[in-house]
Image: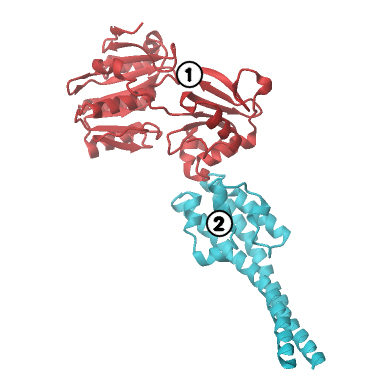
Chain colours: A red, B cyan
Amino acid sequence: MLEKILPDKLSEILNNKINLKAVNEIRLRTDKPVLVSVGGKNFFVCENGLTSNIAQAIFANKLMIEDVIFRASECSIYSVNEQIKRGYIVTDEAVRIGIGGDLIEEDGKVKTISNFCCCNLRIPHTVKNCSLSAFSHIVNGSFVRSALIVSPPGCGKTTFLRDFVFQLSQRDISLNVLLLDERGELDFGINSLYTDKLSFFDKQKGFESGIRALSPDVIVTDEIGQEKDISALEYACGCGVKILASAHCDTLENFLKKPLFERLQKNKIFSRYVFLSKRNGPGTFEGVYDENLSRIYKAF
Amino acid sequence: MKFVLILTVFLLCVGIGVFYSSKFQKRKKFFDALISLADKLSLEINFSRERLKVLIESFDENHKKNLLKVCERYLDFLDKKSELTKEFLFEEAKVLRNDEKDLVFMFFKALGRRDVENQTKELQGFVSRFSEVKTKCDAEQKKYGALSIKLGVVAGLFWAVIMF
């Protein structure tokens, strides 16, 4: 998965000396040690695998970072510039590479990011049955409730959504599911008979054309957080489509402080709120709340 | 036997002349093909934004032949089978001069590294620089290409007369 993107030396270490299945993130920063996140903890990469000793660490450099981004774009930066403008590239294998560098603007519009100085490779995982704890709270027979999966970054929201779609297909619940995959990373390892996909659509266009053209029963989408996303959700809700989405937030208290989410809750867009955390590693199931944000299930 | 030997020496001299002349021809064809490649890339990157590998693979086979395996070697680099070095890229393009190799190497090194607008501008810049080199190659081919053949024939005749 990573051998096409990473420099040979790093790829060899990661493939032979580290269990890649346990790696969540790889961070490269100019003239800083290569950092790997395993089970929520950070380690440096050294010749023998992982280390906490910075003296043994392998350092990344600007050329290495530029090369990773070049390779991730299949050697064609121009073909993924729309993604780069948003700060990331997603490879065919759903590895999301967050990019840091200089923003180039012209007439108030973002043209591109250049002078790359850091990148963060997020490696997708299929964690089978990770959505099961919340599944029965969202699905009742063949009825699906709209649900929002809430957690800080890197806590397994996307993995949860993927597994949820997989679980629906496993149970032969013949609801037409539309994956509205804004960044091209949601559809990884999902093999469902009832799933359609819209990739790289923004939420507004995706919801509109998806509902019109594909008439889904459920729309699954990742990371809502902007005003226009909420409007798109309201539109879909008004059309009678159930929605499964994810959003960034750490606690219920902070969730309620955000005006956008307050609007969601007020309009009862979602019937269930599922909170995840990193407490016992990414994907720790914290609890489920109903449309009034009353707790109906507490994991701990 | 003597006539066969004379004929062989004559043909050998003419052959050497043709060989030197073909070097100029190859350089001219190389830059001709390179201009076509840069034009195609510029157009396709603007129009379809297709990946570099697909664009180079679909480049006209006749032009590819004239590029003296440079395309194949660049595709190896894209497939991560090798590093992009001058030695590797021009292993079979010995007819190019060092400054020409530098220019062509810069071209291949710059491919796929920019957004559409900047990549297109860069490609257009390379097209005009390649055109200048091609004009030079054209003039050299006319001047020295023909001269090599003529010198080959003269040398062949010279040796033929001496041997006769």
**Which x, y percent locates residue A136?**
24, 16
Q: Quadrant of residue A229?
A: top left
Q: Chain of mark 2?
A: B
Q: Nearer the viewer, residue B121 or B73?
A: B73
Does residue A287 appear in this view?
Answer: yes
**Which x, y percent locates residue A279?**
44, 11
Q: Which residue is mark 1?
A: A39
Q: Is residue B99 above or below residue A91?
A: below
Q: Is residue A89 above or below residue B41?
A: above
Left or right placement of residue A32 versus residue A198 in this view: right
Q: Which residue is mark 2?
A: B72
Does residue A119 appear in this view?
Answer: no
**Mark 2 residue type:** Glu
**Mark 1 residue type:** Gly
Q: Is residue A152 above or below residue A162?
A: above
Q: Chain of mark 1?
A: A
Q: Nearer the viewer, residue A225 or B140?
A: B140
- The residues tagged by marks 1 and 2 sit, at their Cα atoms, a distance apart of 42 Å
Q: Quadrant of residue A267?
A: top left
Q: Quadrant of the C terminus of chain A?
A: top left
Q: Is residue A136 above or below residue A236?
A: above
